[in-house]
Image (spheres, helix red, strand yellow):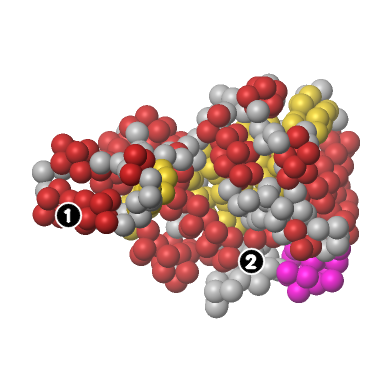
């Protein structure tokens, strides 16, 4: 009998409510198949931070690293300054545990109304593969004020050394800003290793899909680090002649994703653009309440979560949609090798949505969070035991 230990971080706001439903569904399926699941809960989030001052210490990160999977509810609380929990917990886990793959299915289920006129479930079945540890999210940046001249950064020396067109293109603008005005700057980084490994993962995924199409999304016509990314994409692509390969600019994708989502199969994106496009993906699949994600390190600890926020105004009301969290649990089981249980949950979600009898307010229904969880748990157990 297979056995898995899973770390649980219910988090803030509605996080504990949706995580409870995900655990309920997993336990129902495991009870039918004999899969052994041991949950260990961790308190990290706003309450823990306000009580102890800890977001996620080195020792706590070390404790999480002993698990193959972490199941997260949501992070964010109006009592805590924006960015403290997001950077200190979410980004710290992603970077500290090298979860370099953000895996985001964009799937329209039968029975869910798509905001795009005329689009059907067969038109929207996309996997977005977002690089998760580089780009503008590495955290190098600051606001430099004229009142603090010692903190001022001489950007000109760096740019002049690396860019012969600096003087005529951007040099005067940066020099003028850095000497006469406040200045905010962030540094984005794309490495060969970081881009290559995520692009290779995306190619391997596309190779197993029916369309066998991989779309690379950047802004390489304007930003140097994305030209480098595109070069790595072309290099890796030579080893995959059986995969159709294309490159799109991100601004164009924002319209094509809406006009012709049926064209897309697997998409590989740098961190920032992936963050934006996957939220657009959630909208076209029916809303944030349905969108799940995995933050994956194939050789280490991975973390699975709904992509929605903590929605503190709905906390304790038992009315939010738990399907994103339940689908995240399905992705987690698939990652752990429990393919039968994972598929049972995915099929149960599809069946309950198609029936349309049990659904939360965001999908036009009046069911509670726990009622949706109950319905999916019953159906998943039936499918797992069939």
The answer to which quarter of the image holds residue 305 is top right
Q: Position of residue 207 (x, y in %)?
A: 44, 41
Marks 2 and 1: which is nearer the front?
Answer: 1
Residue occupying the far bottom of the picture: 117
Q: Position of residue 253 (x, y in %)?
A: 40, 62
Q: Residues within 10 Å of mark 2 (few under 14, many from 20)?
A: many
User: Can you see residue 189?
Assistant: yes
Residue found at x 33% / y 44%: 149
Q: In whole angstroms, how far apart are the C-alphas of marks 2 and 1?
A: 47 Å
Residue found at x 35% / y 34%: 191
Q: Earlier in the sequence, mark 2 or mark 1?
A: 1
> 319 above or below 243?
below
Q: Which residue is mark 2?
A: 286
Q: Position of residue 123 (x, y in %)?
A: 53, 64
User: Can you see residue 229?
Assistant: no
SS under mark 1: helix
Q: Position of residue 344 (x, y in %)?
A: 76, 45
340 drawn magenta: no
Answer left or right for 68 relative to 162. Answer: right
Front residue of 44 and 340: 44
Residue occupying the far front of the picture: 147
Residue found at x 82% / y 51%: 17
Q: Check the picture and name the quadrant holding the C terminus.
A: top right
Answer left or right for 45 relative to 85. Answer: right
SS under mark 2: loop
> 78 above or below 111?
above
Per the rendering, the mark at residue 172 is 1
359 drawn magenta: yes
Front residue of 47 and 380: 47
Residue found at x 43% / y 61%: 263
The residue stretch that appears in magenta = 349-368
Answer left or right for 52 relative to 382. Answer: left
């Amino acid at each position: 009998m297979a056995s898995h230990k899973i770390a649980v971080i219910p988090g803030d706001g509605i996080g504990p409510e949706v995580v409870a439903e995900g655990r309920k569904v997993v336990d129902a399926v495991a009870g039918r198949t004999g899969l052994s699941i041991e949950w260990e809960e961790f308190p990290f989030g706003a309450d823990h931070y306000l009580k102890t001052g800890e977001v996620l210490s080195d020792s706590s990160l070390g404790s999480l690293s002993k698990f193959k999977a972490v199941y997260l509810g949501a992070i964010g609380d109006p009592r805590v300054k924006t960015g403290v929990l997001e950077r200190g917990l979410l980004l710290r886990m992603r970077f500290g545990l090298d979860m370099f793959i953000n895996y985001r299915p964009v799937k329209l289920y039968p029975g869910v109304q798509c905001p795009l006129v005329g689009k059907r479930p067969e038109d929207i079945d996309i996997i977005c593969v977002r690089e998760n540890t580089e780009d503008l999210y590495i955290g190098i940046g600051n606001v430099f004020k004229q009142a603090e001249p010692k903190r001022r950064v001489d950007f000109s020396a760096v740019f002049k050394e690396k860019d012969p067109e600096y003087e005529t293109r951007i040099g005067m603008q940066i020099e003028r800003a850095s000497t006469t005005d406040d200045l905010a700057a962030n540094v984005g980084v794309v490495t060969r290793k970081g881009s290559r490994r995520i692009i290779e993962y995306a190619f391997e995924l596309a190779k197993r899909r029916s369309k066998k199409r991989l779309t690379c999304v950047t802004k390489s016509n304007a930003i140097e680090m994305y030209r480098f990314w595109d070069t790595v994409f072309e290099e890796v692509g030579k080893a995959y002649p059986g995969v159709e390969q294309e490159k799109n600019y991100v601004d164009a994708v924002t319209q094509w994703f809406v006009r012709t989502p049926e064209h897309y199969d697997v998409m590989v994106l740098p961190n920032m653009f992936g963050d934006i496009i996957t939220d657009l993906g959630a909208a076209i699949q029916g809303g944030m309440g349905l969108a799940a994600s995995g933050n994956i390190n194939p050789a280490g600890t991975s973390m699975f979560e709904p992509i929605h926020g903590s929605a503190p105004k709905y906390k304790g009301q038992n009315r939010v949609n738990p399907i994103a969290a339940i689908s995240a649990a399905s992705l987690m089981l698939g990652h752990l090798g429990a393919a039968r249980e994972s598929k049972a949950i995915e099929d149960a979600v599809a069946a309950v949505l198609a029936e349309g009898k049990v659904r939360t307010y965001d999908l036009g229904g009046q069911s509670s969070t726990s009622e949706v969880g109950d319905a999916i748990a019953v159906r998943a157990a039936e499918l797992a035991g069939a």
